[in-house]
Image (cartoon, helix red, strand yellow):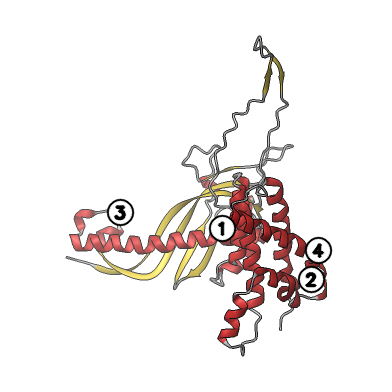
């Protein structure tokens, strides 16, 4: 059997939801390291644009200019993902000139090896795709990017009032249609995401949990949202404090600090690492945080779900955002 040893890479296409970009970004790529490999994610080019999403479209026009109908942004539905693991494979020369999947050119052990390579590369591609989405969510501060859309029960019809005896309609409620917007990626935001992707670091876990809480809120799961908001705040408070402990502290003392009740972080330890401006802002937030943790505890330990309402979740989401923004006021030693 004639074989040539060739360097290989993989190509996949993944569905992406909630992503809109400016026209100049079509065809652009993010190339970044991941777990010893390199991943490249490429947006579809202008040549892939179709007018409607029929389930297989890669990119469709989004918002248009009312005056001249020019497209202001495009909705991206699929992206290409390539992965380079620096692997090689023994390839039949004919494979370089003919369509792929030439099973007749390879024996069973070779076919098995090709499938193993596909699985290895697919695993890295999927991890890279999810990492890319998480970075976009964080840098654009939009939880909807890459998230599945919940199909709701509304039919579009208003509420009818009927005369009980005759069943004649006497009133129809005013219809209110809510059209959700989206955060559109422009060139500056694209470059910001690209710079962070080069670090190969995941976004902070507290930010990811906050986006989980926003998704739960949008789905009407207020109990889950309330718990996740409390988690996002507690993770942030603990991480900010623990990262700034002196290196010379003994491991037993560090463990003791880790196990402190979250209220002690709120009342003492987090405040101590903030600038004066940060302390003033945190003073306005501390009562809200104590209320959030109290409601979370009653929900988890006593089964009291009464406080898990949309109003409370929206209120505590605002507090969580304000808390996370205080990272900029942390005094670095």
Q: Earlier in the sequence, mark 3 or mark 1?
A: 1
Residue ID for mark 3: 100
Q: Earlier in the sequence, mark 2 or mark 1?
A: 1
Toward the viewer: 129 or 90? 129
**Neighbours of disc 3 within 10 Å: few (<14), some (14-19), many (20+):** few
Front-most of residues 322 and 51: 322
Element type at mark 4:
helix
Residue 278, which numbered label? 2
Tell me where residue 250 appears, x and y as whole percent.
Answer: 58, 88
Residue 25 visible in the snapshot:
no
**Which circle's residue, 4 or 2, is located before the other in the chain?**
2
Q: Are circles 3 and 1 on residues that touch, CB within 8 Å?
A: no
Which quarter of the figure is the N terminus placed in?
bottom left
Where does label 1 land, which residue? 28
Question: Mark 4 sits on what residue?
Answer: 284
The answer to whether residue 232 is seen in the rendering is yes
Q: Residue furthest bottom?
A: 248
Q: Nearer the viewer, mark 1 or mark 4?
A: 4
| Distance CA(mark 4)–CA(mark 2) | 10 Å
Please state which of residues 99 and 280 is positioned toward the viewer in this rendering: 280
Between circles 2 and 1, the one closer to the viewer is 2
Q: Residue at x 59, y 45 (%)?
A: 219
Q: Residue at x 71, y 76 (%)?
A: 269
Residue density around tag 1, few if under 14, some if 14–19, many if 20 or more, within 10 Å: some
- How far apart, in angstroms, are the residues tagged by discs 2 and 1? 39 Å
- Name the quadrant containing residue 3: bottom left
Helix, strand or loop for disc 2: helix
Question: Dot 3 lies on which element?
Answer: loop
Q: Nearer the viewer, mark 4 or mark 2?
A: 4
């Amino acid at each position: 059997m004639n074989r040539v040893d060739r360097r290989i890479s993989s190509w996949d296409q993944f569905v992406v939801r909630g992503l809109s970009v400016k026209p100049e970004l079509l065809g652009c790529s993010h190339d970044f390291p991941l777990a010893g490999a390199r991943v490249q994610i490429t947006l579809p080019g202008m040549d892939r644009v179709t007018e409607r999403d029929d389930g297989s479209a890669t990119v469709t026009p989004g918002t248009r200019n009312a005056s001249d109908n020019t497209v202001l942004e495009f909705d991206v539905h699929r992206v290409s993902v390539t992965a380079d693991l620096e692997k090689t494979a023994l390839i039949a020369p004919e494979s370089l000139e003919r369509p792929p999947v030439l099973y007749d050119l390879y024996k069973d052990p070779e076919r098995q090896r090709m499938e193993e390579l596909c699985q290895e590369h697919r695993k890295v591609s999927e991890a890279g795709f999810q990492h890319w989405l998480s970075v976009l969510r964080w840098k654009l501060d939009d939880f909807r990017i890459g998230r599945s859309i919940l199909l709701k029960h509304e039919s579009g019809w208003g509420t009818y009032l009927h005369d009980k005896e005759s069943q004649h309609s006497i009133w129809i409620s005013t219809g209110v249609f809510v059209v959700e917007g989206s955060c559109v990626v422009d060139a500056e935001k694209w470059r910001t995401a690209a710079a962070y992707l080069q670090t190969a670091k995941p976004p902070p876990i507290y930010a990811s949990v906050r986006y989980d809480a926003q998704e739960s809120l949008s789905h009407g799961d207020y109990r889950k949202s309330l718990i996740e908001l409390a988690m996002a705040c507690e993770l942030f408070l603990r991480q900010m404090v623990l990262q700034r402990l002196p290196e010379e502290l003994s491991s037993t003392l560090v463990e003791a600090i880790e196990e402190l009740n979250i209220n002690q972080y709120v009342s003492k330890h987090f405040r101590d690492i903030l600038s004066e401006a940060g302390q003033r802002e945190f003073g306005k937030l501390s009562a809200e945080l104590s209320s959030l943790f109290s409601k979370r505890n009653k929900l988890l330990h006593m089964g009291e779900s009464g406080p898990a309402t949309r109003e409370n979740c929206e209120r505590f989401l605002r507090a969580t955002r304000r808390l996370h923004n205080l990272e900029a006021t942390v005094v670095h030693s």
